[in-house]
């Protein structure tokens, strides 16, 4: 997996900034993409390309598709297309701010910033509700097997697909739940992170148990809490060798599979949703040969 963007397999950093870009009308993005690829190392800056951008370039990456929109009783999962996504990672927030400004300047001739979200590590890797995130993540070789494309073609092997959603929590609603209801919503005990065997079918853990799908739906989660002046929640990020595993999990969460919706929707909601293709790296820089750059 030496060609994978290192930030995908690395542990989450202390600080992050998520930049989302749209393509300016009539713009030719090739030069801006080459400039980004020349400075992005895939570790301090993980890069993802959206279907919108590939359509504009008249290029195709097999397996990349639009994010699905699910709507039902108490559930609204939006699809918010984006051309380009950058996940800036690091230990110093000031450094991330300055790198974000430099990237926005480089991309400005062809791209406009459509979203800026600041993320951070909470405790040992907790959601702001106090529950541990990503407990069932595959480890080591299994993480790479779940997240990274194995392919010998130049510019394809070492790539990954990403699903990204920004979730907004209703903390008042969650705090009003008795502790048992909170635990049953997640499917784990907050006190020791142990899975609750007799949790209701709507518990998040029950909805997304990766081994319960056919085929098994393993993804590598790299989610982080976020906050601004008035709202907060979780930036959900899942990397996969394809988008199939995440899409299967989302379908079940939304109740489209069996009519039972994930209890997460009782206190939090996604406001964005995008699928991305994350190119491999070559000699420490983003490799765009698969799209002719």
Image (cartoon, rainbow, N blue to C red):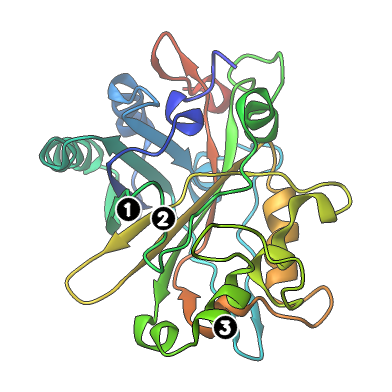
In the picture of the structure, the residue carrying the numbered disc 2 is 126
Q: Secondary structure at mark 3?
A: helix
In the rendered image, residue 276, in percent from the top left (x then y), is placed at 54, 46
Residue extending farthest to the top is 283
Which quadrant, please, contains the N terminus? top right
Disc nearer the start of the sequence (3/1):
1
Marks 1 and 2, how far apart in space? 5 Å
Q: Is residue 30 left or right of residue 250?
A: left
Tell me: residue 240, above or below residue 6: below
In the rendered image, residue 240, in percent from the top left (x then y), is placed at 64, 40
Q: Is residue 23 visible?
A: no
Marks 2 and 3, how far apart in space? 19 Å
Name the residue rendered at 42%, 30% in the picture: 7
Tell me: residue 214, above or below residue 199: above
Numbered badge on residue 122? 1
In the picture of the structure, the residue carrying the numbered disc 3 is 181
Disc nearer the start of the sequence (2/3):
2
């Amino acid at each position: 997996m030496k060609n994978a963007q290192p930030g995908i397999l690395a542990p989450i950093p202390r600080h992050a900034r998520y930049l989302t870009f749209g393509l300016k009308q009539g713009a030719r993005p090739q030069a801006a993409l080459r400039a980004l690829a020349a400075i992005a190392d895939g570790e301090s800056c993980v890069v993802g390309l959206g279907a919108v951008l590939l359509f504009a370039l008249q290029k195709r990456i097999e397996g990349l598709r639009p994010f699905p929109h699910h709507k039902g009783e108490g559930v609204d999962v939006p699809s918010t297309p984006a051309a380009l996504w950058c996940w800036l990672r690091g230990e110093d927030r000031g450094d991330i701010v300055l790198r974000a400004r430099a990237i926005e300047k480089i991309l400005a001739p062809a791209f406009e910033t459509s979203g800026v979200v600041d993320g951070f590590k909470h405790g040992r890797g907790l959601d702001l509700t106090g529950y541990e995130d990503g407990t069932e993540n595959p480890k080591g070789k299994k993480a790479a097997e779940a997240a990274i494309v194995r392919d010998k073609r130049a510019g394809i092997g070492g790539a990954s697909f990403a699903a990204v959603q920004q979730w907004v929590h209703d903390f008042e609603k969650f705090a009003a739940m008795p502790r048992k209801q909170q635990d049953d919503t997640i499917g784990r005990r907050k006190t020791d992170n142990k899975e609750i065997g007799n949790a209701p079918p709507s518990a998040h853990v029950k909805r997304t148990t990766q081994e319960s799908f056919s085929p098994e739906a393993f993804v590598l989660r790299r989610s982080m809490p976020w906050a601004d002046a008035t709202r907060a929640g979780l930036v959900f990020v899942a990397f996969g060798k394809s988008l199939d595993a995440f899409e299967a999990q989302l379908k079940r969460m939304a109740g489209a599979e069996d009519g039972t919706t994930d209890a997460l929707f009782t206190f939090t909601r996604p406001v964005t949703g995008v699928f991305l293709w994350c190119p491999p790296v070559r000699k420490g820089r983003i490799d765009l040969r698969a799209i002719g750059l």
